[in-house]
């Protein structure tokens, strides 16, 4: 198995678990600001452990790599916050979740322009299958729109702040994926992870300035869920940096974007009222087919003998 695929699959599982944990935090009535801030508290200490790595200082351009890694953290954390805010401002889960999930399309465009990456025909077909699987998984795992939101005229809904935030989320996640690849082109995975973690701090400061009277009297299980999500972000991001080091930004992003399917699989075991059905099974099969197609690489022609 190629290294990039192994690390990508590890990231898929971890991000799928992350979706389950944050879902439980939402069920526990934790606000989006609390989830973002406390998960950052869980992310930073775990990231500091990477300072002990022997590989930390490897790389060819530390300044440039750290800048890319820092911008990755800013983009990813800002994307998380925009996603939470989109839902908080009345966004329909059946639209927001699959819409933000197609961020690999942004990555494909940016990787083509900035990194000169190309997909072969089979991989392009796999990308389309992945987008379909992500969209189906989002619809199956999302809540139905509330009656007051569904009753609004289409144009009013199209111009709503929640939709703008959802589109911004999609762009930020797509940008973050390309920046991750650019970071690992210059520095080690561990140093990339440290720069990434520091990138969460400006977004946390923004939230605190925006909401200075935030109530920190949370229950123990709420703290555990939020801190755990931060720890998962740290390990999942390290796996993702490793995947980008060995693979192309386009394919790695498309594969790891299938992580919501893991959340869909775990949902019946952690959330009441959610069961497996024919549609969910079909979505999982579609995702597996996409992953197989995306990992297909044409063999390079052997040099002709003299």
Image (tube, rainbow, N blue to C red):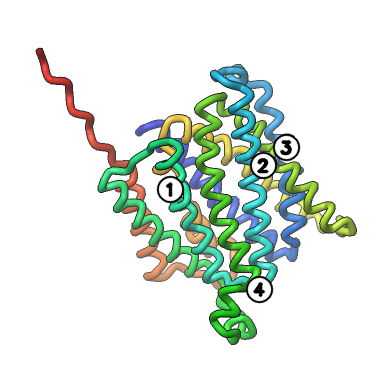
Near-viewer residue (179 or 294):
179
Residue at the limit of the structure toward the left, as seen here: 306
> At 65% from the left edge and 56% from the top edge, which residue is drawn?
22
**Helix, strand or loop under label 4:** loop
Quickly name the residue at label 3: 44
- The relative height of residue 173 versus residue 165 in the rendered view (above or below) is above
Q: Nearer the viewer, residue 55 or 218?
A: 55
Look at 66% across and 32% down and name the residue there.
195
In the displayed structure image, the side of residue 99 where residue 231 appears, left or right: right
Q: Which of marks 3 and 4 is nearer the N terminus?
A: 3
Tag in front: 1 or 4: 1
**Pointer 2 residue:** 231
Label 2 – label 4 distance at C-alpha: 29 Å
Q: Gap in Å between the C-alphas at discs 3 and 4? A: 31 Å
2 or 1: tag closer to the N-terminus = 1
Residue 268 seen in render: yes
Please give the name of the residue rendered at 63% of the width and 68% of the height, measured from the top-left corner: 162
Q: Residue at x 61, y 22 (%)?
A: 62
Q: Earlier in the sequence, mark 2 or mark 4?
A: 4
Q: Please rate how many residues cluster around mark 3, counting C-alpha atoms within 10 Å: few if below 14, some from 14 to 19, many from 20.
A: many
Q: Are marks 3 and 4 in contact (CB under 8 Å)?
A: no
Of the image marks 3 and 1, the number of the one nearer the N terminus:
3
């Amino acid at each position: 198995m190629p290294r990039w695929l192994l690390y990508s699959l590890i990231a898929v599982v971890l991000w799928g678990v992350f979706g389950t944990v944050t879902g439980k935090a939402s069920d526990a009535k934790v606000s989006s600001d609390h989830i973002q801030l406390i998960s950052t508290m869980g992310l930073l200490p775990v990231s500091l452990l990477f300072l002990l790595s022997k590989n930390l200082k490897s790389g060819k351009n530390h300044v440039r790599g750290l800048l890319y890694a820092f911008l990755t953290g800013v983009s990813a954390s800002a994307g998380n916050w925009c996603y939470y805010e989109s839902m908080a401002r009345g966004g329909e889960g059946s639209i927001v979740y699959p819409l933000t999930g197609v961020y690999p399309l942004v990555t494909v465009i940016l990787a083509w322009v900035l990194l000169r990456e190309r997909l072969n025909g089979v991989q392009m077909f796999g990308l389309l299958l992945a987008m379909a699987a992500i969209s189906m998984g989002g619809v199956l795992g999302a809540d139905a729109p509330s009656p007051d939101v569904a009753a609004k005229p289409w144009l009013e809904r199209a111009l709503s702040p929640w939709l703008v935030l959802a589109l911004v989320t999609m762009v930020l996640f797509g940008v973050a994926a390309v920046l991750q690849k650019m970071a690992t082109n210059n520095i080690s995975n561990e140093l990339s992870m440290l720069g990434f973690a520091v990138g969460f701090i400006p977004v946390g400061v923004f939230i605190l300035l925006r909401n200075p009277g935030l109530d920190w009297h949370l229950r123990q299980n709420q703290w555990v869920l939020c801190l755990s999500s931060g720890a998962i972000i740290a390990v999942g991001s390290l796996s993702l940096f490793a995947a980008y080091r060995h693979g192309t930004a386009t394919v790695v992003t498309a594969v790891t974007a299938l992580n919501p399917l893991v959340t869909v699989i775990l949902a019946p075991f952690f959330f009441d009222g959610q069961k497996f059905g024919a549609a969910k099974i079909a979505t999982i099969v579609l995702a597996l087919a996409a992953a197989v197609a995306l990992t297909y690489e044409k063999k390079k022609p052997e040099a002709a003998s003299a």
